[in-house]
Image (cartoon, coloured by chain):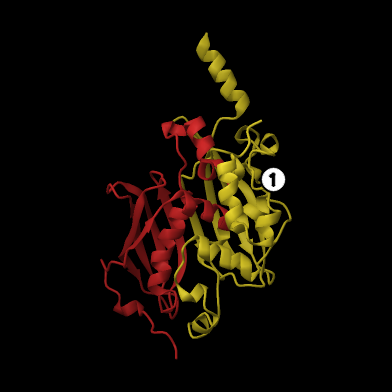
Chain colours: A red, B yellow
């Protein structure tokens, strides 16, 4: 049995993708560091982060690549089993995620590009907010839809 | 010399499962003095060398788990068979561990610089990555600039698989901290 398809022609402008909420902890950050091989002490070492007070924070920050991974998940959760395929990502990281934060990722369809078979794609605007409703990331993605 | 704290080390050891994770120098302070510095990077030169990333099931699983990925298209072979992918694929951002593995402590090592900050990334995706693939990166120093008192470095990288198919293009940027010598100079300057 094939999974259902999301059709390019059925998607309307301003359609909002289901959001994704994740709690950020030092455990999650350290786990991501291991899985992504990014062991930068600014993410992995609370003792060092307290010492160096980079940008005045004095604590570790989540990987920007983790924020990007979560933003990508809202796309893949929505359409990857349904015939969609990521074409491009352009993410701007505005503010770090800290241990104890909760991040909400979302996005909506802002443009449709009809093309020949299999090459039609949509533009998405993406965002990530922390629990204080501060925007931590914005971005654009392009996604092929059948 | 600065060292990774025991607290950090303990958490890392808890999640170190794969062969690559065990082999990898996870203390980014150790070879710090050898990392390429912003001031030494010449735009247009090639980076990242000849290392490859052989994609094993445990590598994809580690990435899937560490991102709290729930989508069965990346986890469940039976499910993935019935999707247009025809089988399991790695999540698109699996290219992150690929870059860190290939960069290592040699060419491209600037991405390990302690305190480096990620201002955002631009990526184009082509062929998906699957278990069994051997990924290579060809990259070059693309741009470096000063902006609002901060130093940015961008590398352009092309990822290809063992069939020579294009997997991704990545314009990867980091904000690099001023190196130790420069910091000391600045502090001394400030005292006068």
Residue B78 spot, x, y in % from top left: 53, 84
* Residue B11, placed above or below residue B117: below
Residue B58 spot, x, y in % from top left: 62, 67
Residue A129 seen in render: yes
- Locate the N terminus of chain B by quadrant: top right
Query: Is A53 left or right of B155, judged from the image as shown?
Result: left
In this figure, what is the number of numbered marks? 1
Query: Is A136 left or right of A47, judged from the image as shown?
Result: left
Residue B125 seen in render: no
Which quadrant of the figure has residue A8? bottom left
Q: Between residue B26 and residue B34, name the one nearer to us.
A: B26
* Residue B191, placed above or below residue A50: above
Residue beneath disc 1: B105
Q: Dot 1, crowdedness within 10 Å: few (<14), some or many (≥20)?
A: many
For image coordinates 59% across by 20% down, the residue present is: B184
Circle 1 sits in a helix, a strand or a loop, which is it? loop
């Amino acid at each position: 049995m094939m999974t259902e398809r999301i059709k390019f022609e059925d998607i309307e402008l301003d359609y909002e993708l289901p959001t994704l909420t994740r709690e950020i902890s030092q455990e999650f950050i350290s786990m991501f560091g291991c899985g992504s091989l990014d062991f930068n002490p600014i993410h992995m070492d609370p003792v060092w982060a307290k010492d160096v007070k980079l940008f005045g924070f004095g604590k570790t920050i989540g990987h920007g690549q983790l924020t990007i991974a979560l933003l990508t998940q809202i796309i893949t959760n929505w359409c990857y089993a349904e015939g969609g395929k990521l074409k491009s990502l352009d993410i701007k990281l505005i503010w770090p995620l800290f241990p104890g934060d909760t991040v909400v990722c979302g996005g909506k369809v802002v443009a449709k590009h009809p093309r020949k078979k299999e090459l039609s794609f949509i533009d998405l605007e993406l965002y990530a907010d922390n629990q204080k409703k501060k925007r931590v990331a914005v971005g654009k993605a392009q996604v092929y839809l059948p | 010399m600065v060292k990774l704290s025991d607290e950090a080390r303990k958490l890392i050891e808890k999640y170190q499962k794969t062969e690559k994770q065990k082999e990898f120098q996870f203390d980014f302070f150790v070879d710090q003095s050898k990392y390429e510095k912003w001031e030494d990077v010449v735009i247009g030169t090639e980076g990242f060398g000849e290392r490859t990333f052989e994609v094993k099931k445990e590598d994809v699983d580690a990435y899937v788990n560490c991102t709290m990925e729930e989508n069965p298209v990346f986890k469940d072979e039976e499910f993935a068979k019935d999707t247009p992918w025809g089988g399991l694929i790695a999540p698109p951002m699996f290219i992150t561990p690929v870059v860190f593995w290939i960069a290592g402590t040699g060419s491209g090592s600037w991405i390990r610089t302690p305190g480096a900050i990620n201002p955002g990334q631009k990526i184009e995706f082509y062929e998906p990555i699957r278990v069994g693939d051997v990924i290579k990166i060809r990259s070059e120093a693309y741009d470096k600039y000063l902006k609002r008192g901060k130093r940015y470095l961008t590398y352009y990288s092309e990822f290809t698989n063992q069939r020579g198919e294009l997997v991704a293009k990545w314009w990867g940027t980091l904000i690099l901290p001023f190196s130790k010598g420069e910091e000391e100079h600045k502090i001394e300057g400030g005292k006068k």
